[in-house]
Amino acid sequence: MLIKLYDFLIALLILSGLAVIVYIFINKDVLFSKKEITKKNNVFVENLYPVQLKVSPFWLKYSTPVRNKKFFSFNNKKDHLIYAADLNDPSQMILVGDYVIVTEPKSGNIVVLLDNNKDNSADEKFIFESGLRYPYGLAYYKNDLYVAAEGSILVYKNFLKQLKNSTAKSDILVSELPTGSLGKLRPLLVGPNEKIYVAVGSSCNSCIEEDKRRASVVTYNLDGSNEEIFAFGFRNPTDLEYRLGFIYLLEESMRSSKIPIPHELNKLKKNSFYGWPALYGNNVPIPETPFEAFKLKNAVPPLLTFEPNFIPSGLGYVNNSKYSGFLISLNSLKESKILYYDLNETTKDLFVWKDSVNKDTFVPRIQDIIPYKKGILVADSKNGLIYYLAF
């Protein structure tokens, strides 16, 4: 009896082993293939955060509780609305007709928002594109949508037609922008001279860059050809704006252990140097930087400076009956604000958020600002919201 049981167990083990071998042979491609996350040009991307695969464009209906919620009051005692919620790190925005286009660098998405009933609160959210590597800068020019990701510049031709057809087909204009820098975000604009302008941050807090495109504004033709350095000497550009025939650049300056260095708003001139890593303000040397390499260069002084503890992140422009000038978002650990600045050098805090023990208030992290109807839209990357603020 024991011998028969032993023979049975041996036979069972042999059959089980054969079954495992057959399974491995049939599924060998799946079990032993190496899956890779790719970006648009199919180059392997390391350390992509978060890992997100490309999904097909689709519309999402917003739930009613977030719409038209009166969220907080400001120091001017006006109530304002949430335009959109449930976003992941909303950063740059542009308005194309009735559509608000938003980049989400951390998720890799380009999102389209639509307010169907015109009540200043979005009713629908459209995932237009996904799986990009830190998409940030946005521009719309002659029916085409331009997007700057960390290492590339893309164009979605006939954007509104693609949106209508739920497609997201792009052409890669530039595929080898510098990557892996302190600032992964690439501000972008297209000028009326039909040139693309993209700002590339430095790779370090203080160094001399080997790649001259770093810490610079680089220009291209609309087809991605004819790469040129337009201006240089910027540690971490956070936004670009074209107004009144000039390009303006918002910059997060370097950190110094010896002196407080203010952040800057710069008015750009072609082939000009703007200080980093050697100078700040009115050509004042920074003590711990490689100043000798730049001693023969006169830096263009900034148009406006900001306190070192307030990081500038978004630059917009409004022109209405009350204001005609720049709106600048500034963020510190316990306070965020929108600063108004006009070309007559008038400055004014328009909106201020301060940390408070009051549970009904909180400090957002304000990113981009764009004009919208009788007010502005403001992106809050910390809380995943976009506010409509009326003047």
Image (cartoon, rainbow, N blue to C red):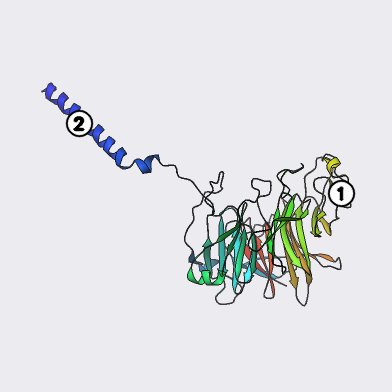
On the image, the x and y values in percent for residue 21 come to: 28, 35
Quadrant location of the C terminus in the rendered image: bottom right
On the image, the x and y values in percent for residue 192 come to: 72, 69
Identity of the residue drawn at 61% across and 60% down:
147
Instruction: Point out which mark residue 297 bears.
Output: 1
Up-down: is 157 above or below 18?
below
Identity of the residue drawn at 20% across and 31% down:
12
Q: Secondary structure at mark 1?
A: loop
Instruction: Point out which mark residue 60 bears.
Output: none
Quadrant location of the N terminus in the rendered image: top left
On screen, residue 21 versus residue 91, left or right, reads left
Identity of the residue drawn at 52% across and 69% down:
162
Q: How many numbered callouts? A: 2
Mark 1 closeness class: few <14, some 14–19, many ≥20 residues within 10 Å: some
Q: Amino acid at mark 2?
A: Leu
The answer to which quarter of the image holds residue 138 is bottom right
Q: Residue placed farthest to the front in the image? A: 226
On the image, the x and y values in percent for residue 318 come to: 74, 71
Q: Amino acid at mark 1?
A: Lys
Q: Secondary structure at mark 2?
A: helix
The answer to which quarter of the image holds residue 379 is bottom right
Up-down: is 17 above or below 151?
above
* Between 122 and 333, the one nearer to me in the picture: 122
Distance, label 2 to label 1, CA atoms, is 83 Å
On screen, residue 29 versus residue 297, left or right, reads left
Between marks 2 and 1 in the image, the one whose residue lies nearer the viewer: 1
On screen, residue 109 versus residue 375, left or right, reads left
Q: Which residue is mark 2?
A: 12
Which one is earlier in the sequence, the residue at label 2 or at label 1? Answer: 2
On screen, residue 249 versus residue 99, left or right, reads right
* Between 88 and 94, the one nearer to me in the picture: 94
